[in-house]
Image: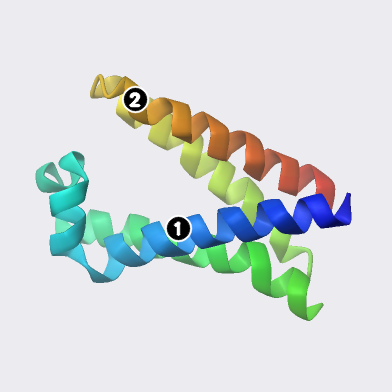
Amino acid sequence: MNIALWIVQGLLGFMFIFAGSMKAFQYEKAQASLPWVKEYSKGLVTFIGISELLGGLGLIIPQATGILPILTPIAAIALAIVMVLAAGFHAKRKEYQGIGMNIILLALAVFVAIGRF
């Protein structure tokens, strides 16, 4: 089970670090690849990006270092909440193709949260 949790943590962490970095530090690239970014302020997009970036780091670093490993399931819960909100956001905008990925990421984050508590 520990190996499965590490694999999922690594995949989720990489995905959130990559996506969060793009939103936080490459606003123009995010505008080009994510249609919704054009309609929202740079501040909001940066906030979302930093949240995802910190959540991705929180999935990996505390558990890997043994320093406050309780932060790993807390990060997973926080990212699960972000995915619920993202699914609602995409549903409101009728971007149904994005909801599937949100649900998959939500399920993986819940798996990590349960497995690491």
Tell me what residue is drawn at x 25 percent, y 55 percent: 45
Q: Is residue 69 left or right of residue 24?
A: right
Tell me what residue is drawn at x 45 percent, y 58 percent: 52
- Inspect this view and state whether residue 74 appears: no
Q: Which mark is residue 97?
A: 2
* Residue 48 sits above or below residue 84 on the image: below
Provide residue 104's location: percent of width, then percent of height.
56, 33
Q: Earlier in the sequence, mark 1 or mark 2?
A: 1
Query: Are circles 1 and 2 on residues that touch, CB within 8 Å?
Result: no
Tell me what residue is drawn at x 18 percent, y 47 percent: 37
Provide residue 93's location: percent of width, then percent of height.
23, 24
Q: Which mark is residue 52?
A: 1
The three-letter code of the residue at mark 1 reads: Glu
Q: Nearer the viewer, mark 1 or mark 2?
A: 2
Q: Is residue 18 left or right of residue 23?
A: right
Label 1: which secondary element: helix
> Local crowd at mark 2 within 10 Å, few (<14), some, or many (≥20)?
few
- Inspect this view and state whether residue 94 appears: yes
* Residue 55 sits above or below residue 40 on the image: below
Q: Is residue 9 left or right of residue 36?
A: right
Provide residue 63's location: percent of width, then percent of height.
76, 69
The residues tagged by marks 1 and 2 sit, at their Cα atoms, a distance apart of 20 Å
Tell me what residue is drawn at x 28 percent, y 21 percent: 92
Where is residue 39, by image quadrant? top left
The three-letter code of the residue at mark 2 reads: Gln
Label 2: which secondary element: helix
